[in-house]
Image: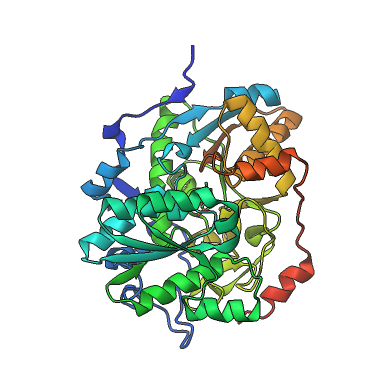
């Protein structure tokens, strides 16, 4: 009988991350200082981020970056993660396609986010930092960083998007259980928060606002650093453990993916599953298709513009060259909170613009239909975010059925949905809707961007 799960042992945890910046054909444009429009250096980031994260952000020369032993040691709690052949899903779809998923939901916090939380907390500790701060949307990143911060003896303050704070109280309890302080954003504790609350008293928050608050706290607190869970190059770097393990596991299964799929918020899990495989496209050995699956309500890669934009709403961050809907874009309150971000990381944006990456946008109801099918076929209730990748994989399998082909499809299951049952409740009750973004919506928040590209 063929294996259902393809498993590695702890000694197979990668010893180095793959740095796509060293090998991608065209490097992304530099981040810019918003006041002077001068390119930034690693030193410019160091007041805000840890020194090592800042260095990694700008490292365009080292293809492999060593994973510290302390980080690999903590990775052992849940890594390597299983690669699973989704035979149940294949059967449900009556497809000849071979569908595999990398199961990142087995981490203690239920998502891939811990892969970057651990090294970032470690680098802060190593540098002698005592406090870290961050934002969280759906709560997965905050949960991951809470655990990592506690492990390395750091104090953590998390700004949590208000709608999630109220909709997902258990994510807040998880963070508090690990010992973090959790603040609903927008809050009265920062200038950025007070400004937004004053102008829009009922505003339910967004990742952009929460980032503004966390950055402000870090810049105004001694010995405090800001830590980010997506979008930036060093976060994508840390997530490559996903794809590096998956590459070995696919080899053990005797296959190589024709299509690699990840859901897309700021790009970290998509990058993590994709970049290690993409390096074989760069070298010309392979021609795998990479598909980023985003929500129709927040379609930066499919309908945004490639332009310099702020990473946050208030305009505290550097200007990043990104596919963006504009930092003022306010996505509908869909349940995949982790995908409600206005932009895409610089590396992914460059690769998209160079034709190395495809993107699809998927309506909310299709993602929950896919999630339900997957849960019944494979047993795992997926996170609403991950369900976008599942829906994209299902589209690929159906297309293959029509075309009479049998591609090998690999997608990343970025997390489980067991703390998202309120969303499933609404789906089951028929209370969920699709949200379409009009061209006017996109124009409204992108036309005002400075045209620097
Ligand atoms: C945060 C999150 C995402 C989206 O973030 P990316 O940086 O795009 O990966 C997707 N899935 C899960 C489960 C998440 O927690």
Residue 24 image position (x, y, % from top left): 45, 57
Residue extending farthest bottom? 36
Residue 117 image position (x, y, % from top left): 37, 53
Whether residue 60 is visible to the viewer of this picture, yes or no, is: no
Foreground of the two, 213 or 5: 213
Residue 66 image position (x, y, % from top left): 26, 51
Question: In the displayed structure, does residue 26 sit left or right of residue 337?
Answer: left
Residue extending farthest top? 1
Vertical side of 88 occupied by 263: above or below: below
Q: Say which quarter of the image contains residue 27.
A: bottom left
Whether residue 172 is visible to the viewer of this picture, yes or no, is: yes
Who's the residue at 38% across and 59% down the image? 234
Count of picture labels: 0
Q: How is the image coloured?
A: rainbow
Foreground of the two, 216 or 78: 216
Question: In the displayed structure, does residue 183 sit left or right of residue 344?
Answer: left
Who's the residue at 78% across and 42% down the image? 430
Q: Say which quarter of the image contains residue 244.
A: top left
Foreground of the two, 204 or 337: 204
Q: Quadrant of the C terminus?
A: bottom right
Question: In the displayed structure, does residue 71 sit left or right of residue 38?
Answer: left
Residue 275 image position (x, y, % from top left): 45, 49
Who's the residue at 49% across and 83% down the image? 34
Vertical side of 371 occupied by 332: above or below: below
Foreground of the two, 53 or 143: 143
Who's the residue at 43% across and 42% down the image? 243
């Amino acid at each position: 009988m063929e294996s259902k799960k393809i498993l590695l042992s702890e000694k197979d945890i990668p010893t180095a991350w793959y740095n796509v910046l060293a090998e991608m054909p065209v490097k992304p444009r530099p981040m810019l200082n918003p006041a002077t429009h001068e390119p930034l250096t690693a030193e410019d980031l160091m007041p805000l981020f840890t020194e090592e994260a800042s260095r990694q952000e700008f490292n365009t020369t080292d293809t492999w970056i060593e994973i510290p032993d302390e980080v690999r040691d903590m990775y052992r709690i849940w890594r390597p993660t299983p690669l699973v052949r989704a035979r149940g899903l294949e059967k449900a779809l009556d497809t000849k396609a071979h569908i595999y998923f990398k199961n990142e939901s087995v981490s203690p916090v239920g998502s891939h986010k811990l892969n970057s939380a651990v090294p970032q907390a470690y680098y802060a500790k190593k540098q002698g930092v005592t406090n870290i701060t961050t934002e969280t949307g759906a709560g997965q990143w905050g949960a991951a960083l809470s655990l990592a911060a506690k492990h390395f003896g750091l104090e953590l303050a998390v700004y949590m998007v208000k709608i999630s704070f109220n909709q997902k109280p258990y994510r807040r309890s998880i963070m508090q259980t690990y010992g973090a302080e959790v603040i609903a954003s927008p809050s009265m504790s920062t200038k950025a928060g007070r400004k937004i609350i004053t102008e829009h008293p009922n505003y339910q928050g967004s990742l952009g606002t929460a980032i503004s608050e966390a950055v402000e706290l870090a810049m105004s607190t001694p010995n405090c650093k800001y830590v980010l869970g997506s979008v930036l190059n060093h976060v994508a770097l840390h997530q490559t453990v996903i794809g590096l393990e998956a590459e070995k596991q696919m080899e053990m299964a005797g296959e190589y993916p024709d299509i690699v799929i990840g859901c897309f918020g700021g790009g970290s899990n998509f990058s993590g599953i994709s970049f290690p495989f993409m390096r074989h496209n760069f070298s010309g050995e392979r021609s795998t298709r990479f598909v980023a699956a985003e929500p129709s309500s927040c379609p930066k890669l499919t309908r945004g513009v490639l332009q310099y934009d702020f990473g946050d709403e208030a305009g505290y961050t550097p200007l990043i060259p990104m596919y963006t809907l504009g930092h003022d874009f306010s996505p509908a309150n869909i349940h995949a909170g982790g995908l409600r971000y206005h932009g895409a990381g610089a590396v992914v944006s460059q690769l998209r613009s160079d034709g190395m990456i495809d993107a699809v946008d998927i309506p909310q109801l299709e993602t929950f239909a896919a999630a339900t099918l997957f849960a019944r076929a494979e047993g795992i209730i997926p996170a609403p975010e991950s369900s976008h990748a599942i829906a994209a994989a299902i589209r690929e399998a159906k297309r293959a059925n029509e075309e009479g082909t049998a591609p090998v499809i690999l997608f990343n299951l970025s997390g489980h949905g067991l703390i998202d049952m309120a969303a499933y409740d609404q789906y089951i009750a028929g209370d969920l809707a699709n949200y379409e973004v009009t061209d006017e919506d996109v124009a409204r928040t992108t036309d005002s961007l400075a045209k620097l590209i």
